[in-house]
């Protein structure tokens, strides 16, 4: 018999009321793989255990009893799912009797899922009478063994104890290797779980709408004599949407809400328009916090263009010297004067002096080519 080839490595005998345990046990046995080191030391042990369980593997035939007899004969081991239900089952007892009659008594494995062995009480006894007759003291693998371990750990230990008994291997060595395998598996599952959570969090973060806050700062020299920033228009151009806001002060900020996630860290168009400042039409990468540099337009309060016009003669005055904030300039042949004041010295109003009598002694900015400085042809005393 040691050299006999068997179709099944084990036949699972159980009461129908323990079918969940029987299925669990079959799945565990068929999925179990020996540690590589143990396999090297025991090359005769098959890589995979084929298990018979009547619910899954039974064939159609003329006699159920004959079929079970054949499958028992084709099984190397008989694994009994022990419980008070199994102890009272006629089918379980018959399968044990036939297996023993085949001369395979020593190849019976007991797996206890409920009850107490040798208790003698109908409600708790888990061994069939035939087992107690042939095995006065048989220590089965008990999923409810005493100890402080978790239910899961006790169940795994009972399974490995059964494997060790079936394969005639040292339980402690096999259990230690199995425990390391379970720990590695648990760590792997935990790592996968963390990666999944991280992926979900990243997906949520990447796809959630976001708010963008933008501040502005003046990069040119600050001149307190010039008007502060007021009524600045800031426009954000998205693909199918325009968001616009107004800044009333240089220290204000713009808040655009519920921007679709697809625009995060993507280039978008920004426009800035404000009197006295250079307009901006540029592309920036959209983030939750933005800072837009703005510059004063030096031409607005610094570029002076005006015509010197005599209101008495109603004609322009060419080649006349005019002093503006200490700078002397001469009107051209068309009576126009042109002067640029540096940003640091700019004002909203400039004082005028001339050798001719000026009706307008100040020029207010900003001004353009339509600006007129009125005079009367009288010489200053």
Image (cartoon, rainbow, N blue to C red):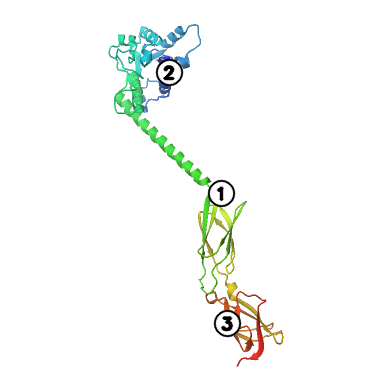
Q: Residue furthest right?
A: 314
Per the model, the C-alpha gap separating discs 3 and 2 is: 106 Å
For marks 2 and 1, the one nearer the N-term is: 2
Residue assigned mark 1: 260
Task: Establish if 269 lies above or below 226.
Answer: above
Residue assigned mark 2: 19
Q: Where is residue 231 in the image (x, y as percent from the top left)?
A: 57, 65
Q: Where is residue 93 in the image (x, y as percent from the top left)?
A: 37, 9
Q: Is mark 1 on a helix, strand or loop?
A: loop
Kindly check if marks 3 and 2 are in contact, taking CB atoms under 8 A apart as contact.
no
Residue assigned mark 3: 351
Per the model, the C-alpha gap separating discs 2 and 1 is: 54 Å
Seen at 54% across and 69% down, the residue is 228
Name the front one of labels 3 and 1. 3
Q: Is mark 2 on a helix, strand or loop?
A: helix
For marks 3 and 1, the one nearer the N-term is: 1
Q: Where is residue 195 in the image (x, y as percent from the top left)?
A: 45, 40
Crowding at mark 3 (Cα within 10 Å: few <14, some 14-19, many 20+) = few
Task: Establish if 365 lies above or below 3.
Answer: below
For marks 3 and 2, the one nearer the N-term is: 2
Kindly check if marks 2 and 1 are in contact, taking CB atoms under 8 A apart as contact.
no
């Amino acid at each position: 018999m040691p050299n006999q080839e068997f179709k099944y490595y084990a036949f699972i005998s159980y009461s129908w009321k323990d079918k969940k345990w029987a299925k669990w046990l079959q799945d565990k046995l068929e999925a179990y793989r020996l540690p590589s080191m143990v396999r090297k030391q025991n090359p005769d042990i098959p890589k995979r255990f084929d298990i018979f369980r009547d619910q899954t593997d039974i064939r159609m035939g003329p006699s159920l009893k004959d079929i079970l007899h054949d499958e028992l004969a084709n099984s190397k081991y008989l694994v009994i799912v022990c419980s008070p239900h199994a102890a009272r089952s006629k089918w379980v007892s018959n399968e044990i009797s036939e297996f023993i009659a085949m001369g395979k008594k020593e190849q019976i494995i007991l797996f206890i899922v409920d009850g107490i062995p040798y208790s003698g009480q109908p409600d708790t006894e888990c061994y069939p009478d035939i087992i107690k007759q042939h095995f006065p003291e048989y220590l089965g693998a008990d999923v409810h063994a005493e100890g402080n371990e978790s239910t899961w750990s006790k169940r795994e230990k009972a399974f490995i104890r059964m494997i060790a008994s079936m394969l005639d291997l040292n339980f402690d060595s096999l259990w230690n290797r199995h425990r390391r395998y379970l720990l590695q598996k648990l760590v792997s599952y935990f790592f996968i779980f963390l990666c999944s959570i991280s992926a979900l969090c990243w997906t949520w973060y990447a796809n959630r709408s976001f708010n963008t806050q933008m501040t502005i700062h003046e990069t040119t020299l600050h001149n307190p004599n010039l008007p502060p920033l007021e009524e600045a228009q800031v426009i954000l151009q998205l693909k199918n949407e325009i968001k616009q806001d107004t800044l009333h002060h240089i220290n204000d900020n713009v808040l655009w809400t519920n921007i679709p996630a697809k625009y995060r860290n993507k280039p978008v168009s920004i426009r800035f328009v404000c009197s006295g400042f250079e307009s901006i039409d540029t592309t920036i990468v959209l983030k939750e916090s933005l800072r837009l540099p703005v510059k004063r337009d030096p031409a607005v309060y610094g570029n002076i263009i005006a015509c010197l016009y005599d209101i008495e003669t109603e004609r322009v005055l060419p080649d006349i010297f005019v002093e503006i904030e200490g700078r002397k300039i001469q009107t051209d042949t068309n009576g126009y004067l042109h002067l640029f004041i540096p940003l640091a010295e700019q004002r909203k109003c400039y004082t005028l002096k001339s050798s001719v009598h000026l009706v307008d002694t100040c020029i207010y900015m900003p001004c353009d080519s339509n600006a007129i400085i009125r005079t009367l042809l009288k010489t200053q005393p």
